[in-house]
Amino acid sequence: MAANDSTVNATIENDYYDYTEDYEDEICNKRDVIKFGAIITPVLFPIVVILSVFGNVLVIVILAKYENLKSLTNAFILNLAISDLFFTAGLPFWTYNHVHGWTLGEHICQMVNFVFYVGFYSSSIFLMLMTAHRYVAVINPLSNIVSTTGSYSVVTCVIVWAVSTLAASPAFLFTKVDQNQCVHKNSPWTLFGIYMQNVLFMLSSVVFIFCNSQIMYRLLRPTVQKRKNKTLKLILTLTVVFFVGWAPYNVAIFLRSLDIRPQTTDSKTLAVLCEASQSLDYAFYICRILAFSHCCVNPVFYVFVGIKFKNHLKKMLKGWGHRNSGIRNRQSRLTITSLTSGEEFSM
């Protein structure tokens, strides 16, 4: 899918963490980099959106149909699915922005950024809480935290959403439409958004490493049940997927935030800096796809690998199959009846 000329000539990054280096605009031609982003984004983002919507909506349906939503575990899973849907809601708009530029007005630009950030922050916080909750359940299964239900789980989730909403609210103040692009008004807010993501990633990394390492250490004890191998593989997979998805992305946005400007006019030095900047931009587009794909991976690893949810899914699919077979049987009976009466019709 080719990008419009207005998009190709836009700044190298035109969404929620936009920044532009003056010297690059003047001497570093990034037309090929922008074309690459305008191709890879519309191709891969829709796949992420479809998988995320399908997986997270399915999680919500199963929880509502078969599970007790008052338990803390189910409350976290439900809210994580909702957070991922909020996060996913921004991706079609970024795709549109890459292809056509921003033509939807400043208010929608601000709202999309706000919703995206609410989903991003809340999803990260709920993942940390779920990891910590799983740690407590393994290390101290008799703890009151493990069996918490009712108002406590509701209050916890409300606090998470309130914090995420507060953290995302500056999007209404510092986002605007400039040169047909949805961007931030100034570099300080852009840098703040980037470093907030970096800090959240580092905090999540500490929680993941500490909790999962302690869980794996406990499961490696010889007194643990035989199912420990499967659980160990799951914990290890969760950790690897998290770091493969988010570590390269956070490194890329941090390096791009440094905004290094050359102190020399030497053409060779400028050429080296330009080449390095272009390589970083290519890496950024790829890392962003990996990171944002986490919203469609969460339902798989945090829900459908569990035996309970697998059984719920099978039960739901069987129910749909019985209803469909019942409809087909009724249609067959109607067709047979109509044929014997000399009147054939299709249902």
Image (cartoon, rainbow, N blue to C red):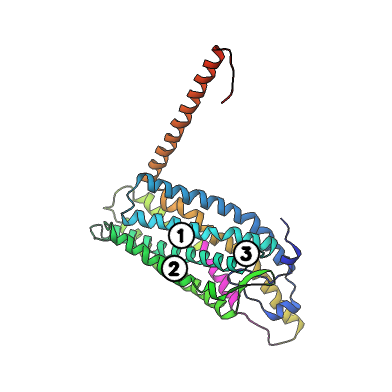
> Would you say residue 209 is visible in this rendering?
no
State the residue in front, 316 or 171.
Answer: 171
Q: CA distance from mark 3 to mark 1?
A: 23 Å
| Residue at image point 55% right, 78% down | 189
Which residue is under mark 2?
A: 164
Which residue is under mark 3?
A: 285
Image quarter where the C terminus lies is top right
| Residue at image point 50% right, 26% down | 328
| Residue at image point 56% right, 64% down | 112
Instruction: Tell me if residue 262 is in the magenta stretch.
Output: yes
Horizontal relation, residue 206 to residue 34: left or right: left
Q: Magenta segment, principal secondary structure? A: helix
Instruction: Tell me if residue 339 is in the magenta stretch.
Output: no
Q: Mark 2: which amino acid?
A: Ser
Q: Which region of the structure is painted magenta?
A: 245-263
Mark 3 residue element: helix
Q: Mark 3: which amino acid?
A: Tyr
Residue 103 coordinates in the image, percent (x, y): 67, 64
> Would you say residue 292 is visible in this rendering?
yes
Residue 247 coordinates in the image, percent (x, y): 51, 66
State the residue in front, 169 or 245.
Answer: 169
Which residue is under mark 1?
A: 83
Mark 1 Cα shell of 10 Å, populated few (<14), some (14-19), many (≥20) = many
Q: CA distance from mark 3 to mark 2?
A: 25 Å
Horizontal relation, residue 45 to residue 61: left or right: right
Q: Mark 1: which amino acid?
A: Ser
